Image (tube, rainbow, N blue to C red):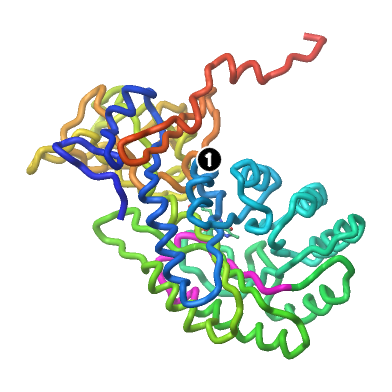
Amino acid sequence: MDHFIYQDGQLFAEDVPVAEIAAAVGTPFYVYSTATLVRHFRLFDEALAWGPHLVCYAMKAASNQAILKTLAAEGAGMDVVSGGEYARAKAAGVPGDRIVFSGVGKTRDEIRMVLEGGIRQLNVESEPEMRAISEVASSMGLTAPITVRVNPDVDAKTHAKIATGKSENKFGIPIARAGEVYAEAAALPGLKVIGIDVHIGSQLTQLEPFEQAYKKVADLTEALRADGHDISRLDLGGGLGIPYARSNEAPPLPMDYGALVQRTVGHLGCEIEIEPGRLIVGNAGLLVSDIIYVKNGEGRDFLILDAAMNDLIRPAMYEAHHEIVPVKEATAGAELTPYDIVGPVCESGDTFAKGRLMPPLQTGDLVAFRSAGAYGAVMASEYNTRPLIPEVLVHGDQFAVIRARPTFDEIINRDTIPEWL
Ligand code: LLP
């Protein structure tokens, strides 16, 4: 459920007409709903209320500080995957002891940075990384709290580019080798083992792969405890999917996911962490764009938008489907026409949808991409020297620009010209 609904024939973001925001900030832009963000966070928080837990928002999905502050005020921790994300989380006021550090290749500089600034735990992804953390922590006279990310060799049944839990993926340590890795961790200076981490992929639309993975983690917990390790925290990753095509998808609900967690690992008495990104922010954001031209082609018609693949890369990169709706509601029974919906960037990959059935539309009409809050603005680029588009946050009847559109001068003045030119 989200808070982008039609009222009196106009699409609203909470209590603000989307067209009003477009008039104020220009198109294209991202708009997020505070009420939807908060609602989704609370669903997870309540789903795990049966025991000690922390919902660590995977800020890679959308990392604007206003979003982080909104969630942190609700009690969220953060899952970060780079020094930059850590700095952002800190800048948004999140204390280090509510930040977990994931990511496949943490550099020594990043490790030093988070140990200095305070960190809840580092999720170790490989033995060389574990040794680096040990060395850095020891050299600072500190002890780094760690979990080891295990790869449970489970098929997440999602898009190949976002599946992470099969043995052929680059993530984590094969679960079969966990015993020896934990033994090395216990022997290394500067490390304190506190638990286990697992994350099998993103946009999962079934619970069964989670169930398989979490059962393996439960067995591993008992085996590691028998070996004398202190396993008091389980980080179960993120990955719960959202409905992108409203008509035919019904991914599991956070409440059912929470019950599954309780069923599979609840008896172990561990503190539970989860790292959801997409489910919290995905349906809390729209990408709003203007139709520049309606072009009648050879056997097909095009809607040419002012948003492009550099603003929302998901369709080009993952063949992702996003619902695209008119901001002015179509009249009931309006005739639908198939359009290829494209951006102005000079490559055919800059296509958002092919043959999409749309109501009558013309130049100057606004359209909104639904489910664009996650992995939208954060994956944008300035390809074709197109400025990163603004982000707007709505709260009831208020809205604020939370990242402004840069001017052309701001973009081009970042280049520096060598003295020989
Ligand atoms: N934890 C870890 C260790 C992760 O790698 C990820 C996502 C998450 C949590 C959050 O997963 P979520 O709850 O959002 O599914 N750009 C892609 C998605 C990449 C996901 C990467 N890792 C997309 O647009 O679909």
Q: Is residue 108 above or below residue 6?
A: below
Quarter of the image for residue 203 reads bottom left
Would you say 92 lies left or right of 13 here? right
Would you say 344 lies left or right of 57 here? left
| Nearer to us in this view, 102 or 190 | 190
Q: Position of residue 180 (x, y in %)?
A: 80, 80
Would you say 356 lies left or right of 393 here? left
| Nearer to us in this view, 397 or 289 | 397
| Nearer to us in this view, 49 or 2 | 49
Residue 197 on the magenta span: yes
Quarter of the image for residue 169 reads bottom right
The amino acid on which the numbered mark 1 sits, given as a three-letter code, is Asn
Q: Position of residue 99 (x, y in %)?
A: 64, 56
Residue bearing the label numbered 1: 64
Quarter of the image for residue 340 reads top left
Residue interval drawn in magenta: 194-210
Would you say 420 lies left or right of 221 here? right
